[in-house]
Amino acid sequence: MADLPRHERGTSVTAEPGHQPQGPVDGSGTRRAFCVLAPNPSMMTLDGTNTWLIAEPGSTTAIAVDPGPDDEGHLRRVAATAAERGQRITTIVLTHRHDDHSGGAAALAERTGAPVRAMDPAYRRGSEGLAAGDVLTGGGCEIRVIETPGHTTDSVCLLVPADGAVLTGDTVLGRGTTVIGTDGSLADYLDSLHQLRALVEEAGLQALLPGHGPLLPDAAGTLDYYLTHRAERLAEVQDAIAAGDRTLADIVARVYAAVDKALWPFAEWSVRAQIEYLHSRGDLPPGMEVPAVPARG
């Protein structure tokens, strides 16, 4: 990763009470989307990375979204799954740059001959990138690109109108909530959540297909939960600051007391993003600056 320290690669989730859907992940999907689960489970990646194959039923081509880590067995299985479905992968798309989504892109491109399209030029292979409003048709069905920065600056979601579904990458997860990385922004993230929420009415959005965890069949309910959760967390951070907490560690210890301590270092990134957001609105006490996230090996 060109712009992320090694300890930030492939970070997505803070597991918290209140949003814990359950269900099978591998092989899940919709009429046009099929999940191939990567074997990289962890506290931060949940069951592993969801690689999505998108194709119109009967199509001989497919788009692979988020190849996952550079794991030969997984990439071989992705290509084989497409072949079993009578398809060949003609385009690879990245929802964002993190290694647990993009690490296998180059190897899958070598295996299939497909170009890699990404918002970040550093991760592209071929002449085409991604931009808001792009329409991809490589799998025989329409896929619309939605720019959704926040988790990272280059995050996108992919709307499959015919299924009433959106592939969310790490913008929305199947369990828990998303970490705002040091290259992300809470202001951007809230705007992205509101944009997705508007799609429920504007595009008949029903289901969310996340980058980690199970499919979410209630798009409206999930997005409402995410927006409410963010507002509550922001209020809790403000309360911690009002109580005199100034370091990320102290604020996390107060606000994330119910969360596994192993996740506290990652929660510091989200707290920093919230303090940065408050700073941008002029809502920090006089003299308080946005603290840096401590370096960790």
Image (cartoon, grey):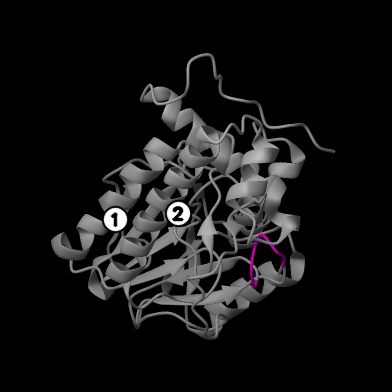
Q: Does the magenta stretch include residue 45?
A: yes
Name above or below for residue 217 compared with residue 98.
below
Q: How many marks?
A: 2
Residue 62 screen position, x and y as percent: 44, 69
Boundaries of the magenta span:
42-47
Q: Does the magenta stretch include residue 143?
A: no
Residue 41 screen position, x and y as percent: 71, 69
**Viewer-side residue, 277 vs 67:** 277
- Which residue is identified by label 2? 171
Q: In which quarter of the image is the C terminus?
A: top right
Residue 30: quarter of image: bottom left
Kindly identify the residue that appears in the image at 48 percent across and 41 percent down: 239
Dot 1 falls on a residue whose secondary structure is helix
Earlier sequence position, callout 1 versus callout 2:
2
Residue 186 screen position, x and y as percent: 44, 39
Residue 70 screen position, x and y as percent: 72, 57
Q: Which amino acid does label 2 sit on?
A: Thr
Q: Badge 2: few (under 14), some or many (20 or more) residues near its Cα, within 10 Å?
A: many
- Which residue is identified by label 1? 196
**Please, what is the dominant secondary structure of the magenta stretch?**
loop
Dot 2 falls on a residue whose secondary structure is loop
